[in-house]
Amino acid sequence: MEQSKNRKNRDITIPIEGMTCAACSRAVEKAIEKLDGVSQVSVNLATNKAKVEYDPGKVRLSQIKDSVLKAGYKPLDIEAEGQVDTHRDRREQRVKTMKNKLIVSLVFAIPLFYISMGHMVGLPIPSIIDPDNHAMSFALVQFLLTLPIVIAGYKFYTVGFSTLFRGSPNMDSLVAIGTSSALIYSIYSMFMIGEGYTEYAMQLYFESAGVIIALVMLGKTLEEIAKGKTSEAIRKLMGLTPKEATVVDEDGREIVIPVADVEVGDVVLVRPGERIPVDGKVIDGYTAIDESMLTGESIPVDKEVGDIVVGGSINRTGTIKFRTTKVGSDTVLSQIIQMVEDAQGNKAPIAKLADVISGYFVPAVVIIAVVAAILWAISGKPVGFVLKIFISVLVIACPCALGLATPTAIMVGTGKGAEHGILIKSGTALETAHRLDAIILDKTGTITKGEPELKDIIVYGDMDEYEFLKLVASAERSSEHPLGQAIVRGALERGLELYNTQNFNAIPGHGIRVDIDGKKILVGNDKLMSNHGIDISVGQGDMETLAKEGETAMYVAVDDRLIGVVAVADVVKPSSKDAIEALHRAGIKVMMITGDNRETAKAIARQIDIDEDDILAEVLPQDKADNVKRLQDEGYKVAMVGDGINDAPALAQADVGMAIASGTDIAMESADIVLMGNDLIDVYTAIELSHKTIRNIKQNLFWAFAYNTIGIPIAAGALYIFGGPLLNPMIAAAAMALSSVSVVTNALRLRGFKPTYR
């Protein structure tokens, strides 16, 4: 199947009804794959959805749906792009229906079991249905009790036999064949009792059919409820969006309207304690906003005029007005929800093993059941014994657990990631992350804050340090250069009031010239000083030292006399060193890549304990991907962590690309994992979550395989050969149901995941 993405191709998600096991999902997958024009298809049993990429010029949507129908399953309306968790209501309705049918089946199964088995262990039953004296009444009551159970579980037969006849049997096929065999033989026994052969009262298997259906329905209902819990992350995220928004019209009136009616460009008012309804930019007011739903960090973020606010976050302190920039499916929250849902629907490579096995498993089970039955019949065992063997093998071999082992863990794992501000876009990324042994970190904006800060002030002469800074910041206040703005911010943070300036002149590549109170102020490099004939010899040593420390230093002169040096630097994020130490302890090689000169790179590396040999400095943007590939060629599983447009090729080249959310949209689109918290410690958390999820999947697969491997021989009578017990079909049904529920329950343990470093 062609894996390359065609620009003309369309991606759709089709909810599907009727899938019950791994064999079902595999059958749907194979049916769609056969169509010319379908390039990719992934069917997820946990979400009951098929993700299909196809060329509309070669195949129509109606043909894809027809192929699903022909496979024996019901395709529902496709989900539109940006639509989230649309199957939730459908799932709730399905669970309600299943509960009602389960109640019906249990109401009749319990007395059926009592009547059929109670007399064998000395429990009293009415004399009218005593098998020794009233064999036909005994049989008829069981038949009448079984009938409603069969009606409640009719889908086992409609789906099971239809898929069997189409050559792709599934779990329902096993139940349908097994219980039908029990029913047919029991009806035959009833006929023989009517003919006077009352000994056939002991060869009724109505209870096997009825109780098996009831137990399988119990297991499927519990499984469906548990599967619903795996989508809790989606529901939590959806619950973050308020239903209403307060919009301020042109006349200044406040109007409360549904969030769905808010348009781009509207002015929205948000008071303290309210959630931000949509994305926008603050135009009035100052506040602190809790963005933990995005970042996982509980510390509120200050917002003022010009800052971006995100829908779903909580306004903590002040009243603000903002102009909406994104609404509906374009909001950050909606995109996050869509990203999480896409990841939950994505199939991890480890799931392919289960898929391949399940595709052959059910037919193999039918063959084993038939062969076992024939062999026992040849050995001289009675029909009842042979029937028990046949039914037990079919029922216990249900591959439900196998099909649920991977997708349920992936759903919970990606959901937990989202709760902690780590958006994992695919099951593949989640699986691959635990095998990483090399990580390349972009410097600017990833290791460092990405914007310069005032670092050092060196004054020559008698001028006070604060007066010096006040003079330099006043000179730079009209500058648009980031270095100048960093100096101004540093002065304002220290509470300094700046001077008025005159005759500001920015000299590209050199610095600035400005007049303050009749004094000529120069701030810039050695070229600027040289052009004005200023002696800089006293400051050259300091400039060299500051450069080695990774700082960008500038000379400051007043009236053609050097008075000092001021330096700014892109400072390391507080958590970067801890994150790198954690990665090192995990045995992961950590490298830093940057376009900066080597001396600056070495200065940063010293602060965060990265070896000099692991520094990739003076790297051009187009060469970053080549460095990733070089490591891959050396046998490393490589992650790239970056935030800029120039990181996008390297993010795409890496085995796992991780983007800092504060970076560009292009970087985030190219990445496999998005770190909403803008914190490198989340790299370690993502790897830690991957380890725990994969361990959980392996546990699930082990128990699913072990269950079937051990269960089938026992059901076929392996223990009986050596004097052991014969497996009752009802016990087989209970064990089958328990296996599915246990796998889903084990996956749900991931909901308790807590990062080591938070």
Image: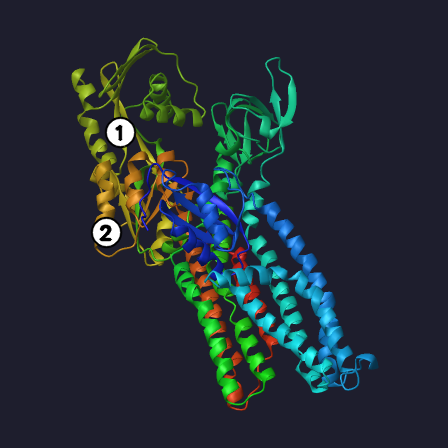
- Colour treatment of the image: rainbow
Residue type pointed to by label 2: Leu
Return the x and y of residue 247 as percentages of the image width and height: 61, 22
- Residue 693 location, quadrant: bottom left
User: 92 and 618: which one is in front?
Assistant: 92
User: 480 and 363: which one is in front?
Assistant: 363
Return the x and y of residue 496 as percentages of the image width and height: 43, 22
In this rendering, the label closer to the viewer, 2 or 1: 2
634 left or right of 431 in image? left
Residue 572 visible to the viewer: no
Kindly identify which numbered label has been placed on residue 249. none
453 left or right of 461 in image? right
In this view, 602 is above or below 105: above
Disc 2: CA contacts within 10 A as few (<14), some (14-19) or many (>=20): some
- Residue 385 location, quadrant: bottom right
Dot 2 or dot 1, earlier in sequence: 1
- Determine the residue positioned at 24% across, 57% down: 635
Residue type pointed to by label 1: Ala
Return the x and y of residue 374 as percentages of the image width and height: 49, 82
Which residue is identified by label 1? 553
- Residue 193 location, quadrant: bottom right
Which residue is identified by label 2? 631
Circle 2/circle 1 CB separation < 8 Å: no
Residue at disc 2, secondary structure: helix
Residue at disc 1, secondary structure: strand
In this view, 108 is above or below 499: below
Return the x and y of residue 61 as percentages of the image width and height: 45, 41
Residue 384 visible to the viewer: yes
**Separation of residues labelled 2 and 1 (CA atoms):** 35 Å
User: 135 and 654: which one is in front?
Assistant: 135
- Determine the residue positioned at 58% across, 79% down: 388
